[in-house]
Amino acid sequence: MPPDLPLPYMSITKIILFSGLFILFFSYIGYGILLWALVKIKRLFAGPQQPAAPFIPPVALIIAAYNEAPVIREKIENTLALDYPPELLHIIFITDGSTDGTPDVVREYPAVHLMHEPFRRGKTAALNRAMEEVTAPVVIFCDANTLLNRDAIINIARHYGDPLTGGVAGEKKVIAADGNGAESTEGVYWKYESALKRLDAALYSVVGAAGELFSIRRELYSPVEPEVILDDFVISLRANMKGYRIAYEPGAYAMEAPSASIREEYKRKVRISAGGFQSIVMLSPLLNIFRYGILSFQYIGHRVLRWTLAPLSLVLALVANIVLVLQQAGGFYTLLLLLQTGFYAASALGYAMALREKKVKLLYVPFYFTFMNLAVFHGFYRYITKTQSSVWAKAARTPATRSI
């Protein structure tokens, strides 16, 4: 039996335990509840929101496509079928460094502008180069391995009738090919994220757009540093820092298949986490709530806590709980420790089932939660050791039949 802790240390240990549990609750559930309540209060005073009037400005659609030969033809045909006046839509495919014939396929379509150079310098460099040729006031970025719904461009463009809208975030939809557990969980996670984005936008602004589909005013774009990992996140938040809001448009969505395996999904999460830490440093002024007010609250509540204190709280809450049980602090703490260890046991079992591509939804909830937070620790290591390249080796994705 370990020696008894002095009473002040017992109290500190309890504070660590409950503080950790509170941070975890707020990061993943409480923020959404508070956001929902604030939006309800805002609507009571603001009244019903009027729908945006039609607005059809010239638009540049930029798609970075590195070695996307298996999907590039479908992507081009999907893009050409979008419902937007063709004389107002300038489509650019940038295929720098591609060696699998992707540029040759793009050349077959005269309505599409190809930009290609033989050297690959990463997506950020490709976007910077493409933006040098853009003259349209509205720019939309999307990934080559996603398909857009027919009304995506119209639904994004109408938001720019509001002069305070600096950008628009579309919705990401993960499509299950056969409904296995990994796909289901990834899809549910993105549905939850979409709900939070909808509330964020209703309160003030989306905080960080996803690269699958997002848009920005041309005048707000400035060249992104080549070492930036999450270019979409940084571009959109820099627009926020200039005093503009990022709108959310669920009627514009990008559909993609889920990661081909849990290992591929983990690789993607690690990269995002490393980029998250990099972004926190690069966008450090946003942490000043006295300067940015509601934007800082949203940024910290929705993003920063998940990349910093929430993963750390998992460790601290478990260690503090173990210490309290060893000190015989009471049956409540024993029950709490059983719940924690049971959660992690379910996570481990869920991981084992995921490796075997078995569908057990009950186990996937604790597994995916733990899995995401482990990726944050790994991403932090990649960030501080500078071993995460900004040139992304894309994750393999499950083949899926996609319809719009």
Image: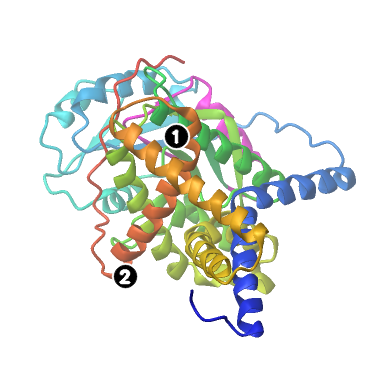
The answer to whether residue 188 is above or below residue 295 is above
Answer with the quarter of the image where residue 347 lies: top left
- The image shows residue 22, relative to residue 38, as above or below, that is below
Q: Residue 384 appears at what percent x and percent y?
A: 31, 70
Return the disc, 1 or 2, that comes first in the chain's sequence: 1
- Residue at the image position 29 percent from the left and 62 percent from the top: 382
Residue type marked 2: Ile
Can residue 242 be seen here? The reply is no
SS at mark 2 in the image? helix
Disc 1 element:
helix
In front of the other: 153 or 270: 270
Q: Position of residue 335 (x, y in %)?
A: 61, 53
Q: Identify which amino acid the numbered label 1 is placed on.
A: Glu
Residue drawn 25% across the image and 41% down it: 394
Asked if residue 322 lies left or right of residue 379, the reply is right
Q: What colour scheme was applied to this rendering of the protein?
A: rainbow
Give x and y (percent) for residue 362: 50, 31
Name the residue that disc number 1 marks.
186
- Name the residue nearer the viewer: 341 or 47: 341
Would you say 67 lies left or right of 200 here? left
> What residue is shown at x 49% (from left), y 42% (from top)?
366
| Magenta stretch bounds | 140-166
Instruction: Give the residue number, with chain letter if any, for mark 2.
Output: 384
